[in-house]
Image: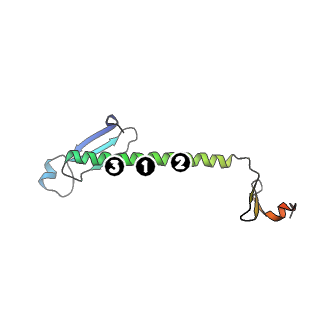
Amino acid sequence: MEDRDLHIVYTRGSGPGGQHKNKVETCVTVTHIPTGLHERCQDTRSKPRNLKIAKGRLAKKIKSQEEFENQAAKNKKRIDLIHNQKVIKTYNYNRNEVYDHRTKVRRDLKRVMNGEFDY
């Protein structure tokens, strides 16, 4: 995140605080232009500190969104692999079953291994 990608606006804060809040523009709104995400901070009375806090929060938001998009892309790729596979049967020894992916039928593994396919 570079400063040229940010749009920074200083405003007066809202809420309790009296004359200081009404006169001094210490509230910071930082917008990340490429993503459209924004963060607002009026936690302290210092403009530079609020800017630093807002940038930190915005960076976390951007990182979280990127991780979410990466995970979604991985999930889509995984689903595509599952749907496009050429697997006919799955032999599950733990459950003692054979699953036929074409007919969606589960069969007893021992009987299939003994050659009894039509039961």
| 4 lies above or below 114 | above
Between discs 3 and 1, the one toward the N terminus? 3
**On the picture, is 33 further left or further right than 22?**
right
Q: Which residue is mark 1?
A: 64
Instruction: Tell me the crowding category of disc 3: few under 14, some 14 to 19, or many 20 or more residues within 10 angstroms, Cα based.
Output: some
SS under mark 3: helix
Instruction: Tell me the crowding category of disc 1: few under 14, some 14 to 19, or many 20 or more residues within 10 angstroms, Cα based.
Output: few
Q: How far, Cα to Cα, is label 3 from label 2?
A: 23 Å
Q: How many marks?
A: 3
Q: In which quadrant of the rendered view does residue 73 lie? A: top right
Q: Amino acid at mark 2?
A: Ala
**On the picture, is 102 further left or further right than 40?**
right
Q: How far, Cα to Cα, is label 2 from label 1?
A: 12 Å
Q: Which residue is mark 2?
A: 72
Between discs 2 and 1, the one toward the N terminus? 1
Outermost residue toward the left in this view: 19
The answer to whether residue 11 shows anywhere in this view is no
Observer-nearest residue: 67 or 35? 67
Q: Which residue is mark 3?
A: 57
